[in-house]
Image (cartoon, rainbow, N blue to C red):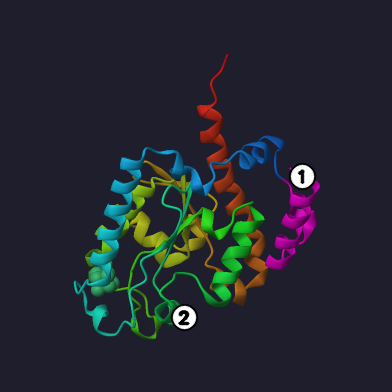
Amino acid sequence: MSADKANRRLQYLQAMGIQPWQLRRSVAAEAISAAQTPAGAVDAEPDEAVEAAKSRWSELRARVETCTACELHRSRTQTVFGVGACNASWMVIGEAPGASEDQQGEPFVGRAGQLLNEMLRAIGLQREEVFIANILKCRPPQNRDPAGAEVEACAGFLQSQVQWVNPEVILAVGRVAAQNLLKTDAPLGGLRGKVHRYGDIPLVVVYHPAYLLRSPLEKRKAWEDLCLAQQVISRQQADQIPRG
Ligand code: SF4
């Protein structure tokens, strides 16, 4: 890693509220992190494949925008489809839009979104390089937890997004996202710190940035979980390196 990049990372860690002395990663992980596929890699695909991918994403977005499959369509300002690189190595999945997301039509905005951006930058990623989505595409009133029927009604949209992005790792952000993706009632504290699976895709659970804003002492654990996810990616990429 260049000195500039290392300095920027220290600044991002400090912005997250983590002391720089905690920054310790393996040389191998750094090297593989630097070699990650850029978000624009889709440009290298044949035109037809790119057009087909654009078309199916547009169709899915249109289906979400007009969806009335659960009661949440009545109270939403707009749907929140998801943003980011459709060929991303990292997929971030949260719970549901909040008030700001409902207004702006984008997941993880506001203070929690800014902290998520800092967390991503701390591991060398720009927000545009990952794909960010939620379990639900419409805001539950008063930000209550999603109801089971709502999750079920909305599940197909997220499943398509995960299938098409086909990330190397999923970050399940917060308790509700983790419990729904892993089909468990286990508390978040028992789910973090491990590598789970969502289908074939490794999944790491991390505290929600809104919680970290209220509980800054937990940021160290969030950093550990981000490093765990980075290790998952590094291991997969190392496995793909041809051996002579
Ligand atoms: Fe449709 Fe999902 Fe919105 Fe419910 S939350 S109306 S299932 S898009």
- Residue 70, position as x, y percentages in the image: 21, 74
Which segment did they paint magenta? 1-24
Q: Residue furthest left?
A: 69
The residue that disc 2 covers is 100
Quarter for ligand 1?
bottom left
Which of the image's four quarters has the C terminus? top right
Q: Residues within 10 Å of mark 1 (few under 14, many from 20)?
A: few
Q: Secondary structure at mark 1?
A: loop
Q: Is residue 244 left or right of residue 18?
A: left
- Residue 218, position as x, y percentages in the image: 63, 66
Q: Residue at x 39, y 86 (%)?
A: 142
Q: Residues within 10 Å of mark 2 (few under 14, many from 20)?
A: some
Q: Is residue 28 left or right of residue 76?
A: right
**Residue 23 highlighted magenta (yes or no):** yes
Q: Which of the 4 quarters of the picture holds residue 238? A: top right
Q: Residue at x 31, y 41 (%)?
A: 48
- Residue 76, position as x, y percentages in the image: 31, 82
Q: Residue at x 62, y 42 (%)?
A: 33
Which disc, if any, is residue 2?
1
- Could you give the CA–CA distance between mark 2 and mark 1, rounded to whole angstroms? 36 Å
Tell me which amino acid carries mark 1. Answer: Ser
Q: Is residue 226 left or right of residue 58?
A: right
As rendered, which of 181 and 116 lies closer to the eye? 116
Q: Is residue 118 above or below residue 37?
A: below
Dot 2 or dot 1, earlier in sequence: 1
Q: Is residue 231 above or below residue 208?
A: above
Tell me which amino acid carries mark 2. Answer: Ser
**Residue 114 highlighted magenta (yes or no):** no
